[in-house]
Amino acid sequence: MIQIHECKPGIDVWYRPNLAEPRRFSAIIETDPWLLGHGVAVCHIRDLPDEYGAFVGTPGRRRVRAVALVALEVR
């Protein structure tokens, strides 16, 4: 898990869309983090590989909005 103070635009990360699975995808943090109303820190990520779009059933999808920091690891 990336810490909120480490989450800065431009950082290379691994994104795990399902924490119960080992599958992960490379990405770049796009925005500074913010807290949702219930206290979960989130940010936007971009530049996911084409395999991510196929994995989620949306070919061409290369961005995720409001991803929880718990799903990210610094590469």
Image (tube, rainbow, N blue to C red):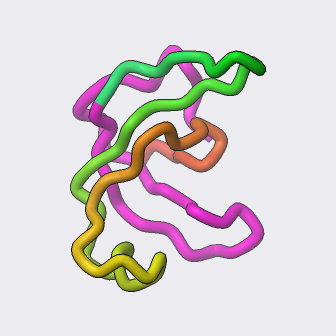
Secondary structure mostly seen in magenta is loop
Front one among 35 and 1? 35
Question: Residue 57, located in which quarter of the rendered image?
Answer: bottom left
Residue 18 included in the magenta stretch of the image: yes
Front one among 46 and 73? 46
**Horizontally, is 53 left or right of 73 in the view?**
left
**Horizontally, is 59 left or right of 3 in the view?**
left
Q: Position of residue 65 (x, y in %)?
A: 41, 42
The residue stretch that appears in magenta: 1-30
Name above or below for residue 69 compared with residue 51: above
Name above or below for residue 69 compared with residue 37: below
Name above or below for residue 69 compared with residue 15: above
The residue depicted at 70 percent of the width and 16 percent of the height is 37
The residue depicted at 60 percent of the width and 17 percent of the height is 35
Question: Residue 3, located in which quarter of the rendered image?
Answer: top right
The residue depicted at 35 percent of the width and 61 percent of the height is 26
Q: Position of residue 28 (x, y in %)?
A: 29, 45
Count the labels in the image.
Answer: 0
**The N terminus is located in which quarter?**
top right
Residue 70 included in the magenta stretch of the image: no
**Horizontally, is 73 left or right of 63 in the view?**
right
Name above or below for residue 40 compared with residue 62: above
Q: Position of residue 6 (x, y in %)?
A: 46, 22
Q: Position of residue 14 (x, y in %)?
A: 45, 55
The residue depicted at 50 percent of the width and 68 percent of the height is 24
